[in-house]
Amino acid sequence: MATATVGTVPLRHPEGLATLFMVELWERFSYYGMRALLVLFMVAPVGAGGLGFGTVEAALIYGNYTMAVYLLCIPGGYTADHLFGARRAVLFGGMVIACGHFTMAMPTPVGFYVGLVLIALGTGLFKPSISAMVGGLYAPDDARRDSGFSIFYVGVNMGALAAPFVTGFLAQSAIFKSWLTDWGLNPAHSWHWGFAAAGIGMALSVAMFWARLRVFGKVGVAPDRPTMTLRGAAAALLGSALLLLALVSSDRPGFEWLRYLIVGLPVAAIAVFVRRGDLEARRVAAVFVLFIASMIFWAAFEQAGLSIALFADRLTDNHLYGFDIPSAWYQSLNPLFVILLAPLFAVLWTRLGARQPSTPMKFVLGMVLLSASFVLMVPAAQLTLEGKVSPLWLVGLFFLQTAGELCLSPVGLSAMTKLAPPRLVGLMLGIWFLGAAFGNKLAGLLGTGFNSEDPAALATFFLSLAGLVGIAMLALAVLMPWLKRLMGGVW
Ligand code: PHE
């Protein structure tokens, strides 16, 4: 079992952490294993077993699906807190996710769409609840708490690291396709074997959770009687359903104006809370400033599963040492770098102690690194004029992006818990997920501009991503003194 040290005293973590680690590992295995194939499957020609979509259509579906996954964490988290408890939400959500992957394993377009909906609904229940259960293992002032979350984040990334190797091998490799042919099966259905592998991962996750339920004691049990209120339920369930509907509809001609909600809602929230003026309200306003920054960060960062996945597939020389690497394997670089770099960042922040950069400054740093990763892709895009480029470009991209992620993502999460009024911590975490949701939707919209046929247009595409993040970074830097005043001493 994992141990942490405070001073020189080794501390054991609660027994439940090992279980939650494995359960989340396999859930993320399924999520990222499927996501590694998602866009490639949509754009693959029908003859090659894909859906034959164009880039624009695939990008919009990617944006809507990944938005839904994180947006549904709000109603999912709310119903778990007030109705059935985190434990049942993890169990039931996990089963729904597994059904979704297995539905996608069926080679029909209907299976594809139904699968996406099931995975989004299930993840909305699963993801906030498993995170809440990690928190529930510790008393609020327990010194092991942060280290517990860091260990849990390693689980997330171990699942994400392993998955593309498995699903990419099944879906994309010539070796597996020839096995299918040998077995008398259709090699064009290889994608669905990849989706099935994701489903098996999720089923394992559910089975482990089920088998180890007794280690959780009272953690995550349902409230004695439902504490749902009409207002709360209306806001969490109806509000998110309407928001989701509005943003999905914004892809339809004539409804594009609904996209302004993505920026309009957080800006309106900032205005309302700044006007209220008391310290609590000003801190909530600060949450929404960080919300916008993180949203733009994710909009560029989540290109990983979209335009970067297409770049890896179409424009990178994947022929190494006589072996064709499945392009999905590049998706493992981000989790790999998280596992390698996270301990370094942890040591760095602890060593710097009181001299470490403030939260907004870390956000600025994260955005500098992310912007730089896309600047790096500009020459890579230009080089595609002469043919496929070296995989090292993507290694560099993911290295810079991951360093950026580690400056922003864990820092932002912890800032939410510190800036939130104590009774609203859960809600503020929901808002943090909403930032990721809006960011993913934007990622889909921006990804429609990807073009693998015209190197000059591609270079401009990457440069504009770098520019977008760069401008947001500059704006945040300029607003920093004001933001720090809003945060009222919690930096
Ligand atoms: N790798 C993280 C995870 O899968 C990405 C993430 C960050 C998701 C923030 C949601 C919010 O957990």
Image (cartoon, rainbow, N blue to C red):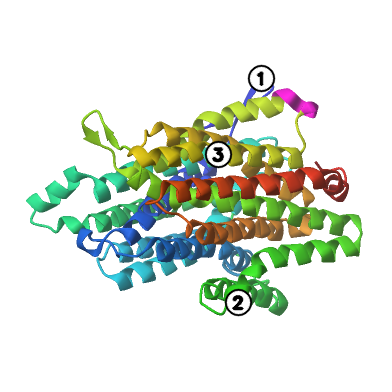
For residue 110, the mark is none
324 left or right, relative to 287: left
| Mark 3 crowdedness (10 Å alpha carbons): few <14, some 14-19, many ≥20 | some
Which residue is found at the position 69% from the left and 55% from the top?
292
Q: Is mark 1 on a helix, strand or loop?
A: loop
- The quadrant holding residue 383 is top left
Earlier in the chain: of badge 1 and badge 2, it is 1
Earlier in the chain: of badge 3 and badge 2, it is 2
Residue 250 horizontal/vertical position (percent): 56, 73
Which residue is found at the position 70% from the left and 27% from the top?
350
Tell me where the magenta segment starts and ends, as one range: 351-355
Which of the two discs, 1 and 2, sits closer to the camera?
2
Residue 247 horizontal/vertical position (percent): 57, 71
Q: Mark 3 points at which residue?
A: 375
Three-letter code, disc 1: Thr
Q: Name the residue under label 2.
A: 242
Residue 75 horizontal/vertical position (percent): 60, 68
Residue at the outermost right position: 278
The chief SS type of the magenta part is helix
Three-letter code, disc 3: Val
Q: Nearer the viewer, residue 308 or 425?
A: 308
Q: Name the residue under label 1.
A: 8
Q: Is mark 3 on a helix, strand or loop?
A: helix
The answer to whether residue 269 is above or below residue 9 is below
Q: Can I make out residue 391 in this image?
A: yes
